[in-house]
Amino acid sequence: MNQKKINSIITLISLTILITIGIQLFWNYENYQTNKQVLFNEVQNSFEDVIEDYYTEANKKTTISIFERNSDSITSLGDYIEIEEIGKHLDKMNSGSTELPNISISNNFEDNSNVKIIKGVPTRKDKVDLQEFEAKYTISISQDSINLKSISKPLQLALVQKNIKTSFRIEHFKKDSIFAEHGDNLNTKEILVTLSSSELIPVGETLKLSFSNPISSIFKRGSIGILASCVLALAIIFSLLYLMRIIKSQKELSEIKNDLISNITHEFKTPIATVLAAIEGITAFSTENQNIKTAKYLQISKDQLHRLNTMVEKLLETAAINSESLELKKSRTDIVLFVQKIVSSAKHNYPNKNIIYHSSIETEAYDIDEFHLENAINNLIDNAVKYGGKAVNITLEKIEEKLIISVLDNGKGIPQDQHKKIFDKFYRISSGNKHDIKGFGIGLYYSHNIILKHDGKLELISTSNSNEFKISL
């Protein structure tokens, strides 16, 4: 998969994530607006119900309605109601009176179905029952003020019962001017307003309810939807990001594979070409007096085939170390003599390098797999020789019951962002076939895993002009 296709997939995934987030935000906003409208309607309905109850109770004291079935017999009302007595009481009332006087009703009224008296304004049910009555007479006193406190308390109780938490203020208007007000001081930016549409409110008057936007109540009502939306959005985003990570990983793996093939090709071509040249040389000789040359070319071929075999073994070791079935064959070993032998071999193999060895302990026995641990340490030394400077320092010491084997070179430091990657299989800081020193990028991977199988730790300490690989057992 080329870089252009990968960039297209990443762009598509990014757009999908953004669209998903946008849709979820829009859905949650619409859900919020719906819940807000529902809650607004509940507050409004509670306000209307409280006003209806208030005026219904108030009108029972200030209004009385008299209904007569036959409008032609109005004088018959005197047979049932003491009208003159009512008039005397009304004359005595002053502007501060809030209730009508008691109206005396004749005892035989209950047996008469032509006249009906209702205290207060007739309800809808009353109006249905009174359809046959033709005449209506109302005695009422009007009030200039409304007891807003008597409305506020039942409204507050109604809102609490509906689990609506909001502060509110009630205002009584007369001809667009505030006549009275009661409630909380609303200092919030978003204030919702509703006007009562009750028919019981006197003409020319208005009751206005202002209340703060109950955001917490709105979100609480839509919490399940919001939570489900967030979970769904996060699941989609996580899946897409995970897919993007897999694509990136596959791209890196493809690059590593190409890099490995390129390096293997270069590594294998040299010994193969050398062996072929030696065989061609032997074939071209005359058989007389060419024993020395033949032996020389055969030795070259042997060395190159041995080198080729070593590279194949390294690849096989890498495959084996990645398997859980690999079991170390540990034995009790003097670690000091073990490291000394490795250092002596390194000095012999790399005569042009200044290999310095120091040990602070004389003898120490450990259970190790000599074959694999020797290969692991040799890989670290080989790495220091190839990429370091002229000197390689190998140190053996014991610190707080831990055995420390350190391989320090004076080469160019490895960047910090590469420290974790260098222990990955086939990873090399350079790429492609432009490495100054050829290799497969498996030495540090192999060493790291062998140390882990010894219950140890391999770490890198790097500066601008040195690299130290430290084994802790």
Image (tube, grey):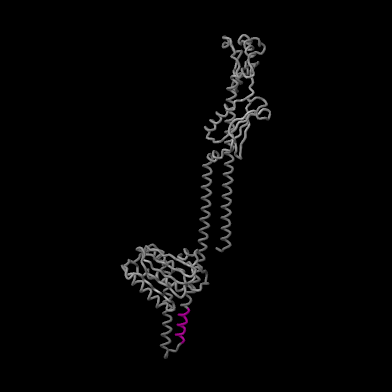
Where residue 331 sits in the image (x, y, percent)? 31, 67
Q: Say which quadrant the N terminus sits in.
A: bottom right
Work out whether residue 362 or residue 277 is closer to the camera in this orientation and state it.
Answer: 362
Q: State whether residue 46 is above or below residue 227.
A: above
Work out whether residue 162 or residue 249 is closer to the camera in this orientation and state it.
Answer: 162
Residue 413 colored magenta?
no
Q: Is residue 455 rendered to the left or right of residue 173?
A: left
Q: State whether residue 366 is above or below residue 272.
A: above
Residue 276 colored magenta?
yes
| Label total for image | 0
Q: Say which quadrant the C terminus sits in.
A: bottom left
Q: Residue furthest bottom?
A: 288
Q: State whether residue 199 is above or below residue 375.
A: above
Q: State whether residue 390 is above or below residue 241.
A: below
Task: Report which quarter residue 202 is drawn in.
Answer: top right
Q: Is residue 138 rendered to the left or right of residue 336?
A: right
Where residue 190 sits in the image (x, y, percent)? 61, 39
Work out whether residue 297 or residue 357 is closer to the camera in this orientation and state it.
Answer: 357
Task: Report which quarter residue 139 is drawn in.
Answer: top right
Where residue 213 sits in the image (x, y, percent)? 58, 38
Q: Is residue 75 rendered to the left or right of residue 1?
A: right
Residue at coordinates 56% horizontally, 58% vertically from top-left?
Answer: 10
State which region is magenta.
273-284
Where residue 145 sits in the image (x, y, percent)? 63, 24
Assign the magenta stretch its main secondary structure. helix
Residue at coordinates 51% horizontally, 61% vertically from top-left?
Answer: 250
